[in-house]
Amino acid sequence: MAASDAREPLPQFPREFLWGVSTSAHQIEGAAGLRGPSVWDAFTAVPGRVKDGTTADVACDHYHRYREDVALIAELGVDAYRFSVSWPRVLPGGSGEVSAAGLDFYDRLVDELCAAGVRPVPTLFHWDTPLALADRGGWRLRDTAERFAEYAAVVAARIGDRAQKWITLNEPAEHTLLGHALGQHAPGEHLLFDALPVAHHQLLAHGLAVRALRAAGVTDIGIANSHGPTWPASSSAADTEAADFYDLLLNRLFADPIVLGRYPEGIAELMPGDDVEADLKVIAEPVDWYGINFYQPTKVGAPLPTATEFSGLTLPQELPFSPRELDDYPRTDFGWPVVPEAFTELLTGLGDRYGDRLPPLVITENGCSYEGIDDQRRIDYLDGHLRALHRAMEAGIDVRGYFVWSLLDNFEWAEGYRQRFGLVHVDFADPAALTRTPKASYAWLREALRAQRP
Ligand code: IFM
Protein backbone atom coordinates (compact mmCIF):
# COMPACT_ATOMS: atom_id res chain seq x y z
CA MET A 1 0.00 0.00 0.00
CA ALA A 2 1.39 3.45 -0.88
CA ALA A 3 1.77 5.81 2.07
CA SER A 4 -0.93 8.05 0.58
CA ASP A 5 -3.55 5.25 0.74
CA ALA A 6 -3.27 5.24 4.52
CA ARG A 7 -4.10 8.93 4.93
CA GLU A 8 -7.18 10.31 6.58
CA PRO A 9 -9.51 11.77 3.94
CA LEU A 10 -9.26 15.53 3.57
CA PRO A 11 -11.89 17.56 5.39
CA GLN A 12 -14.84 18.54 3.24
CA PHE A 13 -14.52 21.89 1.44
CA PRO A 14 -17.62 23.87 0.42
CA ARG A 15 -19.50 22.42 -2.54
CA GLU A 16 -18.87 25.52 -4.71
CA PHE A 17 -15.12 25.65 -3.86
CA LEU A 18 -13.07 26.02 -7.05
CA TRP A 19 -10.27 23.47 -7.56
CA GLY A 20 -7.61 24.14 -10.15
CA VAL A 21 -4.06 23.80 -11.42
CA SER A 22 -1.73 26.60 -12.57
CA THR A 23 1.00 27.17 -15.14
CA SER A 24 2.51 30.18 -16.92
CA ALA A 25 3.20 30.86 -20.58
CA HIS A 26 6.95 31.34 -20.53
CA GLN A 27 7.44 28.30 -18.31
CA ILE A 28 5.59 25.81 -20.53
CA GLU A 29 4.65 27.07 -23.98
CA GLY A 30 7.91 26.90 -25.94
CA ALA A 31 7.37 27.87 -29.61
CA ALA A 32 9.59 30.88 -28.95
CA GLY A 33 10.05 31.47 -32.67
CA LEU A 34 6.31 32.03 -33.07
CA ARG A 35 6.10 35.04 -30.76
CA GLY A 36 7.90 38.31 -30.15
CA PRO A 37 10.92 38.28 -27.84
CA SER A 38 10.50 38.87 -24.11
CA VAL A 39 12.90 39.99 -21.39
CA TRP A 40 13.32 36.34 -20.42
CA ASP A 41 14.67 35.46 -23.87
CA ALA A 42 17.29 38.20 -23.52
CA PHE A 43 18.08 37.20 -19.93
CA THR A 44 18.55 33.49 -20.63
CA ALA A 45 20.78 34.27 -23.61
CA VAL A 46 23.46 35.57 -21.22
CA PRO A 47 25.63 32.65 -20.02
CA GLY A 48 25.56 32.01 -16.28
CA ARG A 49 22.19 33.56 -15.53
CA VAL A 50 20.20 30.32 -15.62
CA LYS A 51 21.85 27.73 -13.40
CA ASP A 52 21.61 24.79 -15.79
CA GLY A 53 22.28 26.96 -18.85
CA THR A 54 18.88 26.20 -20.42
CA THR A 55 16.25 28.39 -22.05
CA ALA A 56 12.47 28.16 -22.41
CA ASP A 57 12.62 28.08 -26.21
CA VAL A 58 10.92 24.66 -26.23
CA ALA A 59 10.05 24.13 -22.52
CA CYS A 60 7.10 21.66 -22.41
CA ASP A 61 6.12 22.56 -25.99
CA HIS A 62 2.63 23.17 -24.63
CA TYR A 63 1.95 25.44 -27.61
CA HIS A 64 1.82 22.35 -29.82
CA ARG A 65 0.71 19.81 -27.17
CA TYR A 66 -2.03 21.78 -25.44
CA ARG A 67 -4.68 19.19 -26.35
CA GLU A 68 -2.77 16.47 -24.49
CA ASP A 69 -2.30 18.85 -21.54
CA VAL A 70 -5.98 19.82 -21.43
CA ALA A 71 -6.86 16.10 -21.46
CA LEU A 72 -4.59 15.67 -18.41
CA ILE A 73 -6.32 18.56 -16.65
CA ALA A 74 -9.77 17.16 -17.41
CA GLU A 75 -8.78 13.66 -16.28
CA LEU A 76 -7.47 15.12 -13.01
CA GLY A 77 -11.00 16.34 -12.31
CA VAL A 78 -10.24 19.98 -11.43
CA ASP A 79 -12.79 22.70 -12.18
CA ALA A 80 -10.39 25.32 -13.54
CA TYR A 81 -7.07 25.87 -15.25
CA ARG A 82 -4.99 28.96 -14.52
CA PHE A 83 -2.65 29.72 -17.44
CA SER A 84 -0.97 32.94 -18.49
CA VAL A 85 -1.21 34.74 -21.77
CA SER A 86 2.13 35.67 -23.27
CA TRP A 87 2.05 39.42 -23.96
CA PRO A 88 4.74 39.15 -26.69
CA ARG A 89 2.78 36.33 -28.37
CA VAL A 90 -0.27 38.57 -28.65
CA LEU A 91 1.58 41.85 -29.31
CA PRO A 92 5.07 40.94 -30.55
CA GLY A 93 6.25 44.54 -30.21
CA GLY A 94 4.47 45.07 -26.88
CA SER A 95 1.95 47.46 -28.43
CA GLY A 96 0.56 48.26 -31.85
CA GLU A 97 0.21 45.33 -34.23
CA VAL A 98 -1.64 42.31 -32.86
CA SER A 99 -0.50 38.83 -33.89
CA ALA A 100 -3.53 36.98 -35.24
CA ALA A 101 -1.70 33.66 -34.83
CA GLY A 102 -0.86 34.49 -31.22
CA LEU A 103 -4.46 35.29 -30.31
CA ASP A 104 -5.64 32.21 -32.23
CA PHE A 105 -3.56 30.01 -29.94
CA TYR A 106 -5.37 31.24 -26.82
CA ASP A 107 -8.68 30.98 -28.63
CA ARG A 108 -7.98 27.29 -29.39
CA LEU A 109 -6.78 26.65 -25.84
CA VAL A 110 -9.88 28.23 -24.32
CA ASP A 111 -12.17 26.31 -26.67
CA GLU A 112 -10.42 23.06 -25.78
CA LEU A 113 -10.81 23.79 -22.05
CA CYS A 114 -14.49 24.67 -22.39
CA ALA A 115 -15.13 21.53 -24.43
CA ALA A 116 -13.48 19.51 -21.65
CA GLY A 117 -15.63 21.21 -18.99
CA VAL A 118 -12.68 23.11 -17.44
CA ARG A 119 -13.01 26.84 -16.67
CA PRO A 120 -10.25 28.93 -18.28
CA VAL A 121 -8.59 31.36 -15.82
CA PRO A 122 -6.15 33.56 -17.73
CA THR A 123 -3.39 35.60 -16.06
CA LEU A 124 -2.40 38.55 -18.21
CA PHE A 125 1.15 39.01 -16.97
CA HIS A 126 3.48 36.39 -15.56
CA TRP A 127 6.83 38.20 -15.98
CA ASP A 128 7.40 37.91 -19.76
CA THR A 129 7.53 41.62 -20.61
CA PRO A 130 7.86 42.21 -24.36
CA LEU A 131 11.50 43.04 -25.04
CA ALA A 132 10.54 46.05 -27.16
CA LEU A 133 8.92 47.67 -24.11
CA ALA A 134 11.75 46.65 -21.79
CA ASP A 135 14.27 48.24 -24.15
CA ARG A 136 12.37 51.51 -23.85
CA GLY A 137 12.50 51.42 -20.04
CA GLY A 138 10.00 48.67 -19.21
CA TRP A 139 8.31 48.79 -15.84
CA ARG A 140 10.40 51.77 -14.74
CA LEU A 141 8.07 53.77 -17.01
CA ARG A 142 4.44 54.65 -16.53
CA ASP A 143 3.93 54.07 -20.24
CA THR A 144 4.26 50.29 -19.73
CA ALA A 145 1.23 50.33 -17.42
CA GLU A 146 -0.78 52.10 -20.10
CA ARG A 147 0.35 49.66 -22.81
CA PHE A 148 -0.61 46.80 -20.47
CA ALA A 149 -4.19 48.06 -20.23
CA GLU A 150 -4.42 48.14 -24.04
CA TYR A 151 -3.11 44.59 -24.20
CA ALA A 152 -5.67 43.51 -21.55
CA ALA A 153 -8.45 44.91 -23.74
CA VAL A 154 -7.16 43.03 -26.80
CA VAL A 155 -7.13 39.70 -24.96
CA ALA A 156 -10.50 40.29 -23.32
CA ALA A 157 -12.09 41.11 -26.67
CA ARG A 158 -11.00 37.72 -27.97
CA ILE A 159 -11.54 35.29 -25.08
CA GLY A 160 -13.62 37.31 -22.60
CA ASP A 161 -16.79 35.57 -23.77
CA ARG A 162 -15.52 32.19 -22.48
CA ALA A 163 -12.95 33.09 -19.81
CA GLN A 164 -14.88 34.72 -17.01
CA LYS A 165 -12.35 34.59 -14.15
CA TRP A 166 -9.26 36.75 -14.78
CA ILE A 167 -5.98 37.56 -13.06
CA THR A 168 -4.17 40.77 -13.94
CA LEU A 169 -0.60 40.23 -12.63
CA ASN A 170 1.33 37.39 -11.07
CA GLU A 171 3.56 38.12 -8.06
CA PRO A 172 4.55 41.74 -8.70
CA ALA A 173 6.60 41.52 -5.47
CA GLU A 174 8.94 38.83 -6.86
CA HIS A 175 9.04 40.52 -10.25
CA THR A 176 10.14 43.75 -8.56
CA LEU A 177 12.53 42.19 -6.06
CA LEU A 178 14.16 39.44 -8.11
CA GLY A 179 13.95 41.06 -11.54
CA HIS A 180 14.59 44.72 -10.82
CA ALA A 181 16.11 45.09 -7.34
CA LEU A 182 18.46 42.09 -7.15
CA GLY A 183 19.00 41.13 -10.81
CA GLN A 184 18.43 37.41 -10.29
CA HIS A 185 15.51 37.27 -12.73
CA ALA A 186 14.83 39.09 -15.99
CA PRO A 187 15.37 41.88 -16.79
CA GLY A 188 18.39 41.47 -14.49
CA GLU A 189 18.43 44.97 -13.03
CA HIS A 190 20.20 45.76 -9.73
CA LEU A 191 18.23 48.82 -8.71
CA LEU A 192 17.73 47.92 -5.03
CA PHE A 193 15.32 50.53 -3.61
CA ASP A 194 15.34 52.46 -6.87
CA ALA A 195 13.10 49.59 -8.06
CA LEU A 196 10.12 51.09 -6.17
CA PRO A 197 8.73 52.77 -9.33
CA VAL A 198 8.53 49.28 -10.86
CA ALA A 199 6.20 48.31 -8.01
CA HIS A 200 4.06 51.41 -8.51
CA HIS A 201 3.77 50.95 -12.26
CA GLN A 202 2.73 47.33 -11.89
CA LEU A 203 0.07 48.33 -9.38
CA LEU A 204 -1.11 51.02 -11.76
CA ALA A 205 -1.12 48.46 -14.59
CA HIS A 206 -3.28 46.23 -12.43
CA GLY A 207 -5.83 48.99 -11.77
CA LEU A 208 -5.92 50.12 -15.39
CA ALA A 209 -6.35 46.51 -16.53
CA VAL A 210 -9.23 45.99 -14.09
CA ARG A 211 -10.95 48.95 -15.73
CA ALA A 212 -10.17 47.69 -19.24
CA LEU A 213 -11.47 44.22 -18.42
CA ARG A 214 -14.66 45.57 -16.90
CA ALA A 215 -15.19 47.76 -19.95
CA ALA A 216 -14.95 44.56 -22.02
CA GLY A 217 -17.64 42.91 -19.89
CA VAL A 218 -15.44 40.76 -17.62
CA THR A 219 -17.01 40.41 -14.18
CA ASP A 220 -14.72 38.19 -12.10
CA ILE A 221 -11.27 39.73 -11.60
CA GLY A 222 -8.42 39.29 -9.14
CA ILE A 223 -4.63 39.47 -8.81
CA ALA A 224 -2.13 36.78 -7.71
CA ASN A 225 0.16 38.18 -5.00
CA SER A 226 2.75 36.20 -3.07
CA HIS A 227 2.50 36.29 0.70
CA GLY A 228 4.06 34.52 3.67
CA PRO A 229 4.40 35.10 7.39
CA THR A 230 7.58 36.88 8.41
CA TRP A 231 9.13 35.65 11.64
CA PRO A 232 11.73 37.81 13.42
CA ALA A 233 15.04 35.97 14.01
CA SER A 234 14.89 37.03 17.69
CA SER A 235 12.95 39.40 19.93
CA SER A 236 15.71 42.02 19.73
CA ALA A 237 14.64 45.46 18.51
CA ALA A 238 17.01 45.21 15.52
CA ASP A 239 15.63 41.87 14.36
CA THR A 240 12.01 42.88 14.90
CA GLU A 241 12.48 46.11 12.98
CA ALA A 242 14.19 44.27 10.10
CA ALA A 243 11.40 41.67 10.02
CA ASP A 244 8.73 44.39 10.02
CA PHE A 245 10.38 46.03 7.04
CA TYR A 246 10.59 42.75 5.13
CA ASP A 247 6.93 42.12 5.99
CA LEU A 248 6.06 45.53 4.56
CA LEU A 249 7.82 44.73 1.27
CA LEU A 250 6.33 41.27 0.86
CA ASN A 251 2.96 41.47 2.57
CA ARG A 252 1.85 45.10 2.45
CA LEU A 253 3.48 47.01 -0.41
CA PHE A 254 1.17 45.39 -2.97
CA ALA A 255 -1.78 44.47 -0.76
CA ASP A 256 -2.42 47.76 1.09
CA PRO A 257 -2.92 49.84 -2.08
CA ILE A 258 -5.29 47.27 -3.60
CA VAL A 259 -7.25 46.49 -0.44
CA LEU A 260 -7.08 49.84 1.41
CA GLY A 261 -6.30 52.32 -1.38
CA ARG A 262 -3.13 53.58 0.32
CA TYR A 263 0.54 52.70 0.64
CA PRO A 264 2.05 51.71 3.99
CA GLU A 265 3.35 54.73 5.90
CA GLY A 266 6.33 56.47 4.32
CA ILE A 267 6.05 54.70 0.93
CA ALA A 268 3.80 57.00 -1.14
CA GLU A 269 6.44 59.76 -0.94
CA LEU A 270 8.93 57.45 -2.65
CA MET A 271 6.70 56.63 -5.60
CA PRO A 272 6.98 58.28 -9.03
CA GLY A 273 4.47 60.50 -10.81
CA ASP A 274 2.80 63.84 -10.26
CA ASP A 275 -0.23 62.52 -8.44
CA VAL A 276 0.27 59.29 -6.54
CA GLU A 277 -3.06 59.82 -4.74
CA ALA A 278 -4.89 59.83 -8.08
CA ASP A 279 -3.03 56.66 -9.11
CA LEU A 280 -4.07 55.02 -5.85
CA LYS A 281 -7.71 55.51 -6.81
CA VAL A 282 -7.04 53.51 -9.99
CA ILE A 283 -5.03 50.88 -8.11
CA ALA A 284 -7.85 50.39 -5.60
CA GLU A 285 -10.41 49.71 -8.33
CA PRO A 286 -12.45 46.99 -6.59
CA VAL A 287 -11.48 43.39 -7.32
CA ASP A 288 -13.87 40.47 -6.98
CA TRP A 289 -11.35 38.41 -5.04
CA TYR A 290 -7.72 38.52 -3.99
CA GLY A 291 -5.28 35.76 -5.04
CA ILE A 292 -2.64 34.36 -2.68
CA ASN A 293 0.45 32.47 -3.78
CA PHE A 294 1.88 30.74 -0.73
CA TYR A 295 5.05 28.67 -0.46
CA GLN A 296 6.84 29.32 2.84
CA PRO A 297 7.29 31.61 5.83
CA THR A 298 10.55 33.58 6.15
CA LYS A 299 12.70 34.18 9.21
CA VAL A 300 14.27 37.62 9.02
CA GLY A 301 16.90 39.38 11.11
CA ALA A 302 18.93 42.57 11.11
CA PRO A 303 21.46 42.96 8.27
CA LEU A 304 24.61 40.86 8.52
CA PRO A 305 28.07 42.32 7.90
CA THR A 306 28.55 40.42 4.62
CA ALA A 307 26.44 39.54 1.58
CA THR A 308 24.32 36.46 2.35
CA GLU A 309 23.29 33.40 0.36
CA PHE A 310 19.64 32.57 0.83
CA SER A 311 17.44 30.14 -1.08
CA GLY A 312 19.79 30.16 -4.05
CA LEU A 313 20.02 33.99 -4.06
CA THR A 314 22.97 36.22 -3.25
CA LEU A 315 21.65 39.11 -1.19
CA PRO A 316 23.70 42.30 -1.08
CA GLN A 317 24.82 43.81 2.20
CA GLU A 318 22.98 47.08 1.59
CA LEU A 319 19.59 45.51 2.34
CA PRO A 320 18.15 46.58 5.71
CA PHE A 321 17.29 42.96 6.59
CA SER A 322 18.70 39.48 6.13
CA PRO A 323 16.60 36.36 5.67
CA ARG A 324 17.83 33.42 7.78
CA GLU A 325 17.47 29.70 7.28
CA LEU A 326 14.49 28.17 9.09
CA ASP A 327 15.88 25.04 10.66
CA ASP A 328 13.80 22.26 12.22
CA TYR A 329 11.44 21.82 9.28
CA PRO A 330 11.49 19.37 6.37
CA ARG A 331 12.63 20.97 3.12
CA THR A 332 11.63 20.66 -0.51
CA ASP A 333 14.29 19.91 -3.11
CA PHE A 334 14.52 23.68 -3.61
CA GLY A 335 15.51 23.94 0.08
CA TRP A 336 12.27 25.71 1.00
CA PRO A 337 10.95 24.84 4.49
CA VAL A 338 7.65 22.95 4.60
CA VAL A 339 5.49 24.66 7.24
CA PRO A 340 1.75 24.11 6.65
CA GLU A 341 0.80 25.85 9.89
CA ALA A 342 2.33 29.04 8.47
CA PHE A 343 -0.36 28.89 5.76
CA THR A 344 -3.11 29.03 8.39
CA GLU A 345 -1.21 31.83 10.16
CA LEU A 346 -0.90 33.81 6.94
CA LEU A 347 -4.58 33.59 6.07
CA THR A 348 -5.90 34.35 9.54
CA GLY A 349 -3.30 37.15 9.79
CA LEU A 350 -4.65 38.73 6.60
CA GLY A 351 -8.11 38.54 8.14
CA ASP A 352 -6.83 40.29 11.26
CA ARG A 353 -4.99 42.93 9.26
CA TYR A 354 -7.70 43.86 6.77
CA GLY A 355 -10.93 42.79 8.49
CA ASP A 356 -14.03 43.55 6.40
CA ARG A 357 -11.94 45.21 3.71
CA LEU A 358 -10.35 41.88 2.71
CA PRO A 359 -11.98 40.54 -0.47
CA PRO A 360 -12.76 36.83 -0.70
CA LEU A 361 -9.49 34.94 -1.22
CA VAL A 362 -8.46 32.41 -3.86
CA ILE A 363 -5.24 30.43 -3.43
CA THR A 364 -3.78 31.00 -6.88
CA GLU A 365 -0.56 29.01 -6.23
CA ASN A 366 0.68 26.49 -3.71
CA GLY A 367 3.04 23.61 -4.37
CA CYS A 368 6.57 22.29 -4.03
CA SER A 369 9.63 21.10 -5.93
CA TYR A 370 10.48 17.42 -5.57
CA GLU A 371 12.21 14.95 -7.85
CA GLY A 372 10.62 11.64 -8.78
CA ILE A 373 7.40 10.20 -10.13
CA ASP A 374 6.47 8.38 -6.91
CA ASP A 375 6.36 11.78 -5.19
CA GLN A 376 4.99 10.92 -1.77
CA ARG A 377 6.59 14.06 -0.32
CA ARG A 378 4.48 16.23 -2.68
CA ILE A 379 1.39 14.38 -1.47
CA ASP A 380 2.44 15.12 2.12
CA TYR A 381 2.94 18.77 1.21
CA LEU A 382 -0.42 19.19 -0.52
CA ASP A 383 -2.28 17.20 2.09
CA GLY A 384 -0.75 19.29 4.90
CA HIS A 385 -1.41 22.59 3.17
CA LEU A 386 -5.02 21.73 2.31
CA ARG A 387 -5.68 20.84 5.94
CA ALA A 388 -4.02 24.12 6.99
CA LEU A 389 -6.21 25.99 4.50
CA HIS A 390 -9.31 24.31 5.84
CA ARG A 391 -8.37 25.35 9.38
CA ALA A 392 -8.17 28.98 8.26
CA MET A 393 -11.60 28.64 6.64
CA GLU A 394 -13.02 27.16 9.83
CA ALA A 395 -11.60 30.20 11.63
CA GLY A 396 -13.75 32.39 9.38
CA ILE A 397 -11.49 33.26 6.42
CA ASP A 398 -13.48 33.35 3.18
CA VAL A 399 -11.47 31.31 0.67
CA ARG A 400 -13.18 30.38 -2.60
CA GLY A 401 -10.63 28.25 -4.43
CA TYR A 402 -7.23 26.53 -4.53
CA PHE A 403 -4.87 26.09 -7.49
CA VAL A 404 -1.87 23.75 -7.31
CA TRP A 405 1.39 25.03 -8.73
CA SER A 406 1.94 23.32 -11.09
CA LEU A 407 0.27 21.05 -13.63
CA LEU A 408 3.57 20.20 -15.35
CA ASP A 409 7.27 20.19 -14.53
CA ASN A 410 8.48 23.32 -16.28
CA PHE A 411 11.12 26.01 -16.75
CA GLU A 412 11.69 27.26 -13.19
CA TRP A 413 13.22 30.63 -14.14
CA ALA A 414 16.85 31.06 -12.98
CA GLU A 415 16.89 27.40 -11.85
CA GLY A 416 16.17 26.15 -15.38
CA TYR A 417 14.69 22.64 -15.33
CA ARG A 418 16.38 21.66 -12.05
CA GLN A 419 13.31 22.19 -9.88
CA ARG A 420 10.26 20.06 -10.63
CA PHE A 421 6.96 21.48 -9.36
CA GLY A 422 4.63 19.36 -11.57
CA LEU A 423 1.86 16.92 -10.75
CA VAL A 424 2.88 15.55 -14.15
CA HIS A 425 6.48 14.64 -14.94
CA VAL A 426 7.90 15.93 -18.24
CA ASP A 427 10.86 14.08 -19.73
CA PHE A 428 13.11 16.98 -20.70
CA ALA A 429 15.94 14.50 -21.38
CA ASP A 430 14.07 13.47 -24.54
CA PRO A 431 13.17 16.80 -26.15
CA ALA A 432 11.61 15.16 -29.20
CA ALA A 433 9.09 13.27 -27.06
CA LEU A 434 8.71 15.45 -23.91
CA THR A 435 6.67 12.56 -22.55
CA ARG A 436 4.15 13.48 -19.84
CA THR A 437 3.82 10.97 -16.98
CA PRO A 438 1.32 11.65 -14.19
CA LYS A 439 3.01 11.34 -10.79
CA ALA A 440 1.65 9.70 -7.64
CA SER A 441 0.51 13.17 -6.48
CA TYR A 442 -1.68 13.49 -9.60
CA ALA A 443 -3.46 10.21 -8.75
CA TRP A 444 -3.77 11.26 -5.11
CA LEU A 445 -5.30 14.64 -6.01
CA ARG A 446 -7.73 13.03 -8.46
CA GLU A 447 -8.97 10.70 -5.73
CA ALA A 448 -9.08 13.51 -3.16
CA LEU A 449 -11.22 15.58 -5.53
CA ARG A 450 -13.56 12.66 -6.21
CA ALA A 451 -14.07 12.35 -2.45
CA GLN A 452 -14.98 16.06 -2.30
CA ARG A 453 -17.91 15.37 -4.66
CA PRO A 454 -19.62 12.25 -3.36
O1 IFM B 1 7.43 28.84 -10.78
C1 IFM B 1 7.09 29.89 -9.94
C2 IFM B 1 5.96 30.71 -10.55
O2 IFM B 1 6.29 31.16 -11.80
C3 IFM B 1 5.64 31.88 -9.67
N1 IFM B 1 5.42 31.47 -8.31
C4 IFM B 1 6.40 30.60 -7.69
C5 IFM B 1 6.66 29.40 -8.58
C6 IFM B 1 7.71 28.49 -7.93
O3 IFM B 1 8.91 29.17 -7.76
Image: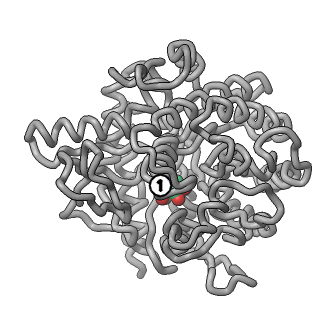
Vertical side of 127 occupied by 148: above or below? above
Which is nearer the eye, 181 or 438?
181
- Residue 123 appears in the picture as rendered: no
On the image, the x and y values in percent for residue 270 come to: 42, 25
227 on left or right of 160: left
What color scheme is it? Answer: one colour
Vertical side of 434 occupied by 87: above or below? above
Which is nearer the eye, 254 or 403?
254
Instruction: Inspect the image, locate mark 1, and give the three-letter code of the amino acid beneath it.
Output: Gly
- Residue 100 appears in the picture as rendered: yes
Is the N terminus in the top left, top right, bottom left or bottom right quadrant? bottom left
446 on left or right of 310: right
217 on left or right of 284: right
On the image, the x and y values in percent for residue 188 come to: 52, 55
Q: Residue furthest right?
A: 100
Report the residue at 76% width, 50% height from top.
88
Q: Which residue is mark 1?
A: 183
Report the residue at 74% width, 62% height from top.
70
Which is nearer the eye, 26 or 302?
302
Q: Count residues near mark 1 (Cα–Cα under 10 Å), then give few for <14, some for 14-19, many for 20+.
A: many
Report the residue at 67% width, 37% height from top.
165
Q: Residue furthest left?
A: 236
On the image, the x and y values in percent for residue 111 come to: 84, 51
**Tag count in the figure?**
1
Q: Is mark 1 within 8 Å of ligand 1?
A: no
Splitting the image into 4 quarters, where does residue 124 fall?
A: top right
235 on left or right of 265: left
SS for callout 1? loop
On the image, the x and y values in percent for residue 32 come to: 76, 64
Report the residue at 67% width, 47% height from top.
135
